[in-house]
Image: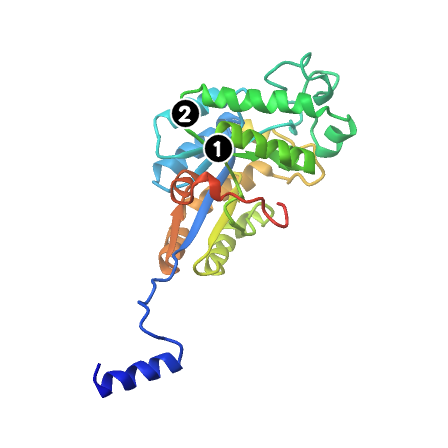
Amino acid sequence: MNVRALCVAAVLAWVGIGYAPIQAAEPTQLLIRCDDIGMCHAVNMACKELIEIGLPFSASVMFTCPWYQEAVELLKDHPQVSIGVHLTLNAEWENYRWGPIVGREAVPTLVDSLGFFFPSRAAFFANQPEISEIEKELRAQIERALSSGLQIDYLDHHMSTAAATPELRKLLEKLAAEYRLGISRYFSEKNTQGIYAVAIDAKADSLTAAIQKLEPGNLHLLVFHIGRNDPEMQALVDMNSFGLQNMSQHRHAELNALCSPSFRSSLEENSIRLTTYRQLIADKKLDSMRRPVPEE
């Protein structure tokens, strides 16, 4: 090495650069997870609309609901969609209820006097549900999903009930390990604030603003509740205190925000790469999963 090269090397070493090759910055990635697929026809049709615009996303399906079979047929035609089991222990809609796959007699501590799931987490836990019955029902939901013919990638939980206690969290992890499935939020995703409670007319702008605030080089998660503002969904009333008024309009506004040109433009302008749980599992592997801290 000549004198000039030695001098250059000394300067580089002094400023901490050295000869190490420059590493490309990690891409900023975003997971779009749409919950409650299969809940009703209006939600399924919103899912279909989202698929048709070509947006990569993950669909969390409620295999306990009457319309799950329509969702299965829809998703079979679109195998590029990453699919999760939206583990369900609540039925929150007035006059539209569902219950356990295994039947009310098999899990009596999970249901009300009519054999339906309880509408709220508080009511569910007030009934002192047996962990063995919860496992029996959640296992049945996973096995129904796996036998549907769809490729199932991950688990998550409706209203967070199936992961609301340390004991349930351990059960969730046990089932994921047994069935070799991912768990949403177990891949160090940053849980970005969604637009669920944002005013209907402000959802699109709020989504664009959220995209602009994503931390570069990180993996982010945005959860949506889409639907169509039609008579079926307009008739649904959430019995929980946090339920939204004009819920069908809120869900349709979330769909419109995802389908909007401004959302696509904000992704491009901020160099955001959309990914799915299927791709994430392929890239990071199931063994990389870690329980979120703090738990979400």
Amino acid type, mark 2: Leu
Q: Quadrant of residue 134?
A: top right
Q: Position of residue 193 (x, y in %)?
A: 56, 51
Q: Is residue 207 above or below residue 125?
A: below
> Which residue is the site of mark 2?
150
Q: Position of residue 34 (x, y in %)?
A: 49, 38
Q: Quadrant of residue 8?
A: bottom left
Q: Is residue 117 visible?
A: no
2 or 1: tag closer to the N-terminus: 2
- Helix, strand or loop under label 1: loop
The quarter of the picture where the C terminus appears is top right
- Helix, strand or loop under label 2: loop
How many residues crowd mark 2 within 10 Å: few (<14), some (14–19), many (20+)?
some
Report the front residue among 178 and 146.
Answer: 178
Q: CA distance from mark 2 to mark 1?
A: 13 Å
Q: Which residue: 52% across, 24% down?
A: 142
Specify the farthest residue to the front. 1
**Left of 240 or right of it: where is 148?**
left
**Left of 124 or right of it: where is 4?**
left
Q: Is residue 150 visible?
A: yes
Q: How is the image coloured?
A: rainbow
How many residues crowd mark 1 within 10 Å: few (<14), some (14–19), many (20+)?
many
Q: Which residue: 33% across, 83% down?
A: 10
Do the residues under discs 2 and 1 have CB atoms within 8 angstroms? no
Report the front residue among 170 and 36.
Answer: 170
**Left of 185 or right of it: where is 128?**
right
Q: Nearer the viewer, mark 2 or mark 1?
A: 1
> Which residue is the site of mark 1?
181
Amino acid type, mark 1: Leu
